[in-house]
Amino acid sequence: MADGIEIGFGPLEQSGQGPGGSGDLVVFVGDDLSLGSAAREALGASGADLVARAAASEKFKGRALSALTLPAPSGVGADRLVVVGLGSEKDRAKTDWPALGGFTAGKVAGRTARVVLDWPGTTVTATQAGEFALGARLRTYAFDRYKTKKKPDADDKSVTALTLMLADHGAAAREGEGARSLSDGVILARDLVNEPPNVLFPAEFARRASELAKLGVEIEVLEPARMRELGMGALLAVAQGSAREPRIVIMRWNGGPAAEPPVALIGKGVVFDSGGVSIKPGGGMEDMKGDMGGAAAVVGALHALAARKARCNVVGAIGIVENMPDGGSYRPSDILTSMSGQTIEVINTDAEGRLVLADVITHVIRSTKPKALVDLATLTGAIIVALGQDIAGMFSNDDTLAGNIHAAGEATGEKVWRMPLIPAYDKAIDSKFADMKNTGGRHGGAATAASFIKRYVEDVPWAHLDIAGVAMSSNASEINRSWGAGWGVRLLDRLIRDHYEAR
């Protein structure tokens, strides 16, 4: 069981063989209300007529992601029949399998159900069943560990138990294990984003990331003394106003050839962002516990990759700080020296994430010489203004990498939109007193922030994902009802699976 759900797999021909009078039977229909042969057999001779009559009574049209619930026919071995709509033939041809799994799990939440993956014109594959299971797992996630009023363990109705019935159930069970690994990575990321900042301070975040060692991930934790030795003046400046000391965690998954350069994944991990001396308005500041969504995604992705023994080398690195105001805080007009040697004039202490990323990126490039680098950061409110809360902004110096990330986003539903990087944006961060400023002003704020990061990536193929709109408080979906979305884990896993993993 994982987070309130158990998922098993069974042969299609046993769809109707459940314990009498308990649980649900789930079948699927298109807009013509036709049942698949296994569903018809499971329901018995009168089943199709029952569905048709109930649909007419309830004005159920079989539209995609709609449902009809009614008492099960006698002899079926269930107490409820749940009919899930798939829509038109065109809709069925582009079925979003995780969304279908999530929707279905939502309709039988807290119950036991046999799910008959069978309808006319379709043979559900093991891969599709695995994606269905992934969506079901993600839908049932809830972060309630700090609620004191919970249901008693005895006869706990919060557990959803699904048996997915399909022809290739053996292969589907193997795909289901992969879905479990991936969902566990997403859930880990969600947990991290949802945690309060008095619990998930930098040292505790580093400890939790270090638990990936149990999966074979090599862990290195850099503490402030080592950061000072390395000359990480940008990251240390952000942290100096907090009583909580910063950490950097380097996570190495060595699943490929020893001599193969790794793919680098870098995450911004600001566990709470008050804005520092340039303090944020009070309204909504509580959301700034999620300003470490990029770091959470990197940890979740490394978990998913290690759990499925990915055949590639990946290094994940997260810079973990708290940005607070006190007498020791860094100030507007301070000039910092980053690990790269480049100097930075501080214009706004609330433009802190790019300072953290600058030193972590420099360290990773120098120490691992990656073949490609992707950073994820809840970096700017400007990207939310531009793209809303369904799509992340992508900036890149490499068309191939950008295209691969876009394709991974389309495949997983974690969509990105490429934004421009032009010389004018870079010029906007030039400083009169140092090599650069840490902000280029209000206009084009997401692009000037990306231009700042670009000055640290040297000639490595690089993409920056600004996930401020999608990592936290994003729009609910069929696979997510959580404040913290765990966004990016599935995208990164798919990117590496499709383009960097040994075949």
Image (cartoon, helix red, strand yellow):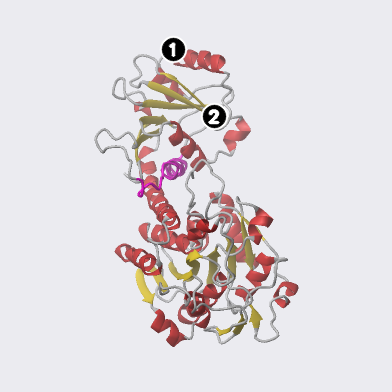
Crowding near the residue tagged with mark 2, few <14, some 14–19, many ≥20 C-alpha atoms within 10 Å? some
Query: Looking at the image, can residue 382 be seen?
Result: yes
Query: Along the polypeptide, which appears first: circle 1 or circle 2?
Result: 1
**Rendering coords of residue 114 (x, y %):** 37, 30
Q: Which residue was labeled with disc 1?
A: 46
* Residue stretch rendered in magenta on the structure: 125-147
Residue at the (55%, 84%) spot, across then down = 340
Above or below residue 55? Residue 414 is below
Rendered-image quadrant of the C terminus: bottom left
Distance from Cα at disc 1 to Cα at disc 2:
22 Å
Q: Is residue 130 magenta?
A: yes
Above or below residue 462? Residue 48 is above
**Total numbered labels:** 2
Q: Which residue was labeled with disc 2?
A: 66
Front: mark 1 or 2: 2
Above or below residue 4? Residue 13 is above
Q: Which of 237 and 44 is in front in this view?
A: 237
Residue at the (55%, 14%) spot, across then down = 57
Residue type of the residue flagged with mark 2: Ser
Q: Which of 360 and 87 is in front in this view?
A: 360
